[in-house]
Image (tube, coloured by chain):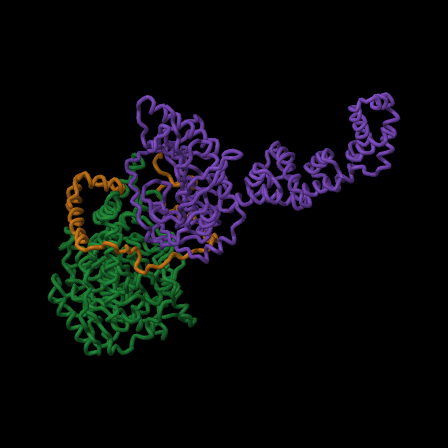
Chain colours: A purple, B green, C orange
Amino acid sequence: MDWETVIGLEIHAQLATRSKIFSGASTRYGAEPNTQACAVDLGLPGVLPVLNEEVVRMAVKFGLATHSTVAPRSVFARKNYFYPDLPKGYQISQYELPIVHDGYLDIELDEDTVKRIGITRAHLEEDAGKSLHEDFHGMTGIDLNRAGTPLLEIVSEPDMRSAKEAIAYMKKIHSLVRYLGICDGNMQEGSFRCDANVSVRPKGQEAFGTRTELKNINSFRFVEQAINYEVERQIAVLESGGTVVQETRLFDADRHETRPMRTKEEANDYRYFPDPDLLPVEIDQAFIAEVTLSLPELPDVKKQRFMDDFGLSAYDAGVLTATRELGDYFETVVESSGGQGKLSANWVMGELSGALNKAGLEIDASPVSAGALGGMLRRIEDGTISGKIAKQVFEALWAGEGTADEIIESQGLKQITDSSAIEGIIREVLENSPTQVEQYRNGQEKVFGYFVGQVMKATQGKANPKQVNELLKKMIND
Amino acid sequence: MHHKTLVELSAGLRQGEYSSEELTRTCLDRVALLDKQLNSFITVTEELALQAAREADARIRSGEAGPLTGIPYAHKDIFCTRGVKTSCGSRMLDNFIAPYDATVTQRLNDAGAVMIGKTNMDEFAMGSSNETSFYGLVTNPWDSETVPGGSSGGSAAAVAARLVPVSTGTDTGGSIRQPAALCGITGLKPTYGRVSRYGMIAFASSLDQAGPFARTAEDVALMLGAMAGFDPRDSTSVERPPDDYTGGLNKSIKGLKIGLPEQYFGEGLDSGVTAAVEAALDEYRKLGAVITEISLPNSQLAVPAYYVVAPAECSSNLSRFDGVRFGYRAEVPADLEDLYKRSRGEGFGAEVKRRIMIGTYALSAGYYDAYYLKAQQVRRLIREDFMRAFEQVDVIMGPTSPSAAFRVGEKSDDPVTMYLSDIYTIAVNLAGLPGMSIPAGFTADMPVGLQLIGNYFEEAHLLNAAHRYQQVTDWHNRVPQGYE
Amino acid sequence: MALEAQEVERIAHLARLGIDPDDIPDYARNLSDILAFVELLNSVDTCGVEPLAHPLEAVQRLRPDVVTEADERENFQSNAPLTEAGLYLVPKVIE
C-alpha cells in the first residue's frame, strides 16, 4: 500500500527579551542555578504576574509577518498540572483566545515549487525550569532560571507531507523569527524547539490517521531523523495489522529512534481556565500600526527586491535572503561596490561563502567586511584588477593585510593598461617565439592563446586581458 | 491607653503624652495577659515591634510622623512579612519565613505603623468561624463559647478585645465584614483592585481584597488611606490614586438614598438581628437619609456561584504548595507522586482539601461549562443587579450576617450551612464592590453588624455614612466583659 | 449529584492530595452536598450572558522590559526543604 505522511509542527521560540514574561528577572542563558529565579518565577506564596510589553510587541511582529490575525483581545489561561520544573503547579499560557491566529507561510520546495503552510495559531506562554538528572544521591535537581522565560508557541496546520517539507517550514520560521529579532534561534541552548505531530494514512484517504507527538527534537537533523523513523515505525505497525497508539514519544538522539514517554498521560486533564491574576490583553490599531512601522523588510519581500533590483535569479536571491545577516552583508557589498549586484552575489555566494564554510564561521564573524569586499569589487569593475587577480586580493583581505586598494598597491597588482607598455611586452614575446609566429601565420590560429599566455606570464597576470587581445591581434598581423 | 482609638492615640503620641514604645509595650502586655483565652495571635513579634516603635518615636520627634506612625497593629497571617513566619493558618506553611514583604506590609511599614504580631485565621482564609486554623480556634471576646467569625477571626477578636487599636484582614466572601459583625467592630472590604494583592497569599484571586479593622469608621478611614493605592506588581491593582477617606467623614448625610434589598430580610434571618438592623435604619432616618426597598433578584445565586468560582481559583492557587521550594514536605517520600500527595495531604486541613477537590472537579474535563462558566455568567447577573440598584440609591444596607456569633462546633460538620453564614456578604465580592460592617446593637448580648455596600470606589461615601452613625450611637464603644 | 468514592479518588489524584481511605466516604458526602447546593445555579437561564471573570473588566497593563530583580537565591532557598548546589531536590523524575 502507498502511504501518505501528515505532519504538523509546534515550534517553541523563546522570545529575546531582557526580562521574563511575568517578572523582572533576567533571561540571560547560562547563569548559576536558581540565581535568575525571582519570587514570581519561584511561585512563592502571594506573588503575582505582570505582563512584559516587549513580549506582546514580539508576538504582534510575528503575527504581522505571517499574514495572521492579531487578536484585538487575547486571554491568558492556566494549564494545571504537577511537575517539579513547573513551580506554581500551572503554566500560564493562552488557550481559547491566542494573541495570533490564522496565518500562513510559503515554503520553497525546489526552484519552482512553492507550498503554503497554514499557521493555526501562535500563543504566548511561560517556559518551565529544567530538571537535571545528574545523580544527586538518586534525586533530581531543579533549576528554575528558565522558568518564566517568554515563549511563542507556533502551531502549524497538519499541512506537511514529508520530513523534507517539515524541515523547510521549520527553517523558514527559524529564519523569520531571527529576521524579526524576536528569537535568537539558538537550538543548542533551547531557544528554538520543535515538537512534531506525525501520522500516516493510505494515499487517497481523507481522514487523518492516529498521530503521535514527538518531543525533544532540538536540531533540524534530528527533526528529519525523528519524523522519518516515526513514519516507518507507524507504517510497519499498520502493515502488520496493528494500530498506532496516540501518545507522546521522545526522540533518542543517540539511537536515532523514538520511544514512548514513561510518564503516565492518563491524567492529562489540564483544567484550563482564565488566569484571574491577569486581565485580557487588548491590542488596538495604533499599537499594530506602531509595530508595523518597526518591522524589518521580510525575507520574501527582500528576495523579490533582490531579483528586481539586482537581476538575481530566484535561487540566488533565496540564498542571499536566508538570514537577515547575509542579506544585510550582501546589500552593503553591493553598495560599496558601486551597485554591482550580480558581481556581488557571485562573490558572496562563491569565494566568501566557501572561505567561511572552510573556516566554520558565520557571516557576522567574517574576517572580510562587506565594505572591504565591495571596495575590491569596485576595482574589478573599474579595471584596476582582473577577476583572476581579485582572488589573490581576496586572500590578502581575509588575512587582514589591509584594504583592497592598499593590497593592490603594496603587492603591485594593478592591471597594466598602458598600451605602449603592453606593446613592448608583446613585441618581446613575438621576437622570442619565431616558430609560433610562423605557425600562426600559416593558419594555426589556436597558437594565439599561447601568445596571450606568454604576455600574461611576463606581466604576472596584470596586463588587461582585453587590451592584450586587441593589441596582439593587430601586431601579429603586421 | 488601650481604650483609645487610633485617632486619639496618634494625637497622644504627637503631643508626647506617651511614646510608641510605651504604647507598644501596653499592647504586648495585653496580648500576653489575654490572648491565651482568645488565641487571636499565631506569632507575636515582640522584639521587632519594640524596635519599630523606637524608630517611630524617632520619627515622631523629628516631626516626620503621619497619622499611623507609632500605632501598633495586628497583621493577618496571610500577608507576607519579611523575616517573620507567615503561616496562613496552615500546617503547610508552619515553617515558612516569608522572604519578602507584601505591598500592604510595606505600605504600613512606610507609614510607621508598628506590627506587633500575626493573627490567627481560617486555614488559607477558607472558613467563616476561624475553626479551620491549624493553630486552633479563636474565641469570641463577647462569649468564649462562640466563634469570632472568619476567616479574619484573629484580627477581629484582637481589636474587639482591645489588644490593638487596628488590624488588617482579607475578604474573599465576607472574611472582614462577618467577623467584624460577630465581634462588634468596624471593618471594610474595599473595591476589588483598590488595595494591592501582592504578597497576600491568594485564596481566590478574582475575589480577594485586603482591608482594615478598627473600632471606628474614622480609624478605618486612616488605615485604608495607608493600605490603598496602585501597585505595579499587581495586574489587577487599579491605576487611580486613593481618595481622601477622612476629609468627608463629617459631611451631612441628609438626603442620602439608602436601599434595602428585600432579599436580605427574608427567611433565615435571625429576629434579633432584624430588630437591631431596623433600629439602626431608624437612626439613619433621623440623620435625614431616605430609605427605599430595592431588589437584587439573583441574590440567592451568589453563594452557589461563589462555591464554584472560589474553589476553582483556589484549587489552582494552592497547587504551588507541593513540598519542593518551601513549606511542608512529607518525610521520606517514596517517589515524586508520594512527595506531592503526602505533603499536600498532610499539610492541608480538611476544609482546604474539600475546596481544592470541589474546584478541581468544577474545572475538570466535561464539567467546566456546567460549573465554572455557568458561575461566571451568574456572576455577571449579580453584578447587573447591583448596577441597577445603584441607579436608584447611593448606599445599600442590610444585615452583615444572618445571625450573631454561633457556638463553636455548631456548623463545623456541615459545610453548606457554614457557607450560608456568608449569604449577605458574598455577592459583594462577586461584584467587586466595597462593603463595610459596623456595630449596630446586640441580640442576646452578642453584637450585630450592619452592612453598608457602595458603588465602585465609593469607600469614602460608606465611611461618611458609617461615621455619622457612630456620632449618634455608641455600639462601637461597647467593651466585652473581661477586656475592659 | 452524588459523587462516588471512585470519583473522589480521581479528583484527589488530579489535585495530588493524599486522602486517608477511611475519610473518602465523608469527603464523598460533603462534596456531594456542596455540588447539590451548587445545582441551584441551573435555576437561572444564562443563555447569551457573557461570563464575568473580573469585576472591573479592566485591561491588562504592560510592564516595560527591564530587569529589576537581583539574585536572592540564598534568601529564597532558606525556606526550601532540600537543596544542593543551588538546586531544589526532588525524588528522581523519570521521563
- Looking at the rendering, in which quadrant would you find the C terminus of chain B? bottom left
Count of residue discs: 0
Residue at image x 40%, y 34%? A7
Query: In the displayed structure, would residue B15 be above or below residue B93?
Result: below
Picture quadrant of residue A13: top left
**Can see residue C70?**
no
Q: Nearer the viewer, residue A117 or B390?
A: A117
> Which residue of the protein is positioned furthest toward the front in this rendering?
A443
Residue A280 lies, in percent from the top left, at 36, 54
Query: In the displayed structure, would residue A257 be above or below residue B44?
Result: above
- Looking at the rendering, in which quadrant would you find the N terminus of chain B? bottom left
Residue B468 lies, in percent from the top left, at 25, 75
Picture quadrant of residue B292: bottom left
Indicate left or right for B240 with B473 as reference.
Answer: right
Indicate left or right for C9 with B12 as reference.
Answer: left
Query: In the displayed structure, would residue C7 be above or below residue C51?
Result: above
Indicate left or right for A398 with A433 as reference.
Answer: left
Residue C4 lies, in percent from the top left, at 16, 40
Q: Nearer the viewer, residue A177 or B72?
A: A177
Q: Nearer the viewer, residue A428 or B80?
A: A428
Residue at image x 33%, y 49%? B96
**Can see residue A327?**
yes
Residue B67 lies, in percent from the top left, at 36, 70
Picture quadrant of residue A415: top right
Indicate left or right for A364 with A9 as reference.
Answer: right
Q: Nearer the viewer, residue B76 or B301?
A: B301
